[in-house]
Image (cartoon, rainbow, N blue to C red):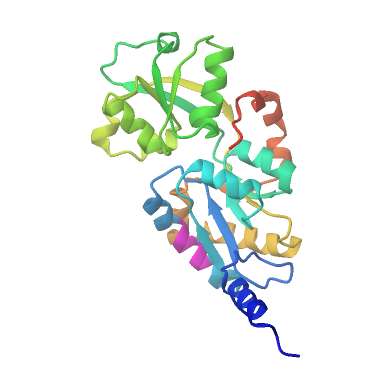
Amino acid sequence: MKTPPIIAILLAAFLSIPHRATAQPDGVGPINVGIVPQFDLRRIDSVWRPLLDTLTVRTGMEFRLDVPPNIPAFEKSLMAGEYDLAYMNPYHYLIAHKRQGYVPLVRDHGGNLSGIIVVATDSPISRVEQLNGKVVAFPAPNAMGAALVPRAEFARKFHITVTEKYVKSHSSAYLAVLLNEAAAAGGIPATLAQLPESSRQKLRVLHETEHFPPHPLAAHPRLTTTQRDVIAKAFLALAQTPEGSQHVKEIPMHDPGPASAADYDGLADLDLQAFYVEE
């Protein structure tokens, strides 16, 4: 039976639409890897692409890097379950685990993380309370160390209200202070350390938040247990090689080791849901 022309046209149009491939349980299709964009996108690409290329050789699986333009875009894809693997902040993991069942594979065992609030070196501000009513730059509302925890502490610990300025990345938040567009900025020690020395010397850490477990690399449950084990073992083995170790440290992940859901159980005690912003 001959297909009517209009149906043939619609069918051809549908088949031409590009569909996001995700790893199937039998391993068919590329594994889509999402990275939370804490750093400049070129820097993330330079760190993660060689790692994933080497993991492809070691595991026989194809990995496709996906670095969204900003943290909210990453969150949208993560919460929709579009990533087979994702490197995310701890609170992203807590939400993504509940909504999609993501399973943590590896994390840094080199110590817990914290957020920081920085001001200009020559700023007269010496106490967090002095930020009341002032502009504070943040990468995005749900950047855990750089915004989520600081905003919660501003409200609960210091009882202040600030004017929030969201600028998409940690480096842009620091730049807002350097350009005198904000009185302070939220970040984390790792991203502050990545600034050029000339810029870093112009910033001063005003406050460090409470600590929390490091970012996990987590897998969507559509990856089989075998696939997850193979990826985790290959990643940790790669981190023991000289070249792989250097790339992993630039994630930053200084002492990579296995991760489990139990590592993040305590995050619920921070009660950050009131400060989490749904896009």
User: Quick one: 238 or 11, which is closer to the camera?
Assistant: 11
The residue at the point 64 percent across, 26 percent down is: 272
Left or right: 119, with 257 as reference point: left
Residue 186 image offset from top left, x and y in percent: 44, 27
Relative to residue 133, is residue 213 drawn left or right? right
Residue 51 falls inside the magenta stretch:
yes
User: In the picture, residue 206 is in which quadrant?
Assistant: top left
Pick whichever, 26 or 80, lies toward us: 80
Q: Determine whether 54 is above or below 206 in the image.
A: below
Q: Residue 279: image x %, image y %?
A: 58, 37
Name the spot of residue 157 as percent of width and height, x first: 56, 12
Q: Residue at x 57, y 74 (%)?
A: 16
Relative placement, left or right, of 81 versus 45 is: right
- Quarter of the image with the N terminus is bottom right
Is residue 8 inside the magenta stretch? no
Query: In terms of depth relative to the viewer, which is nearer, 228 or 249?
Result: 228
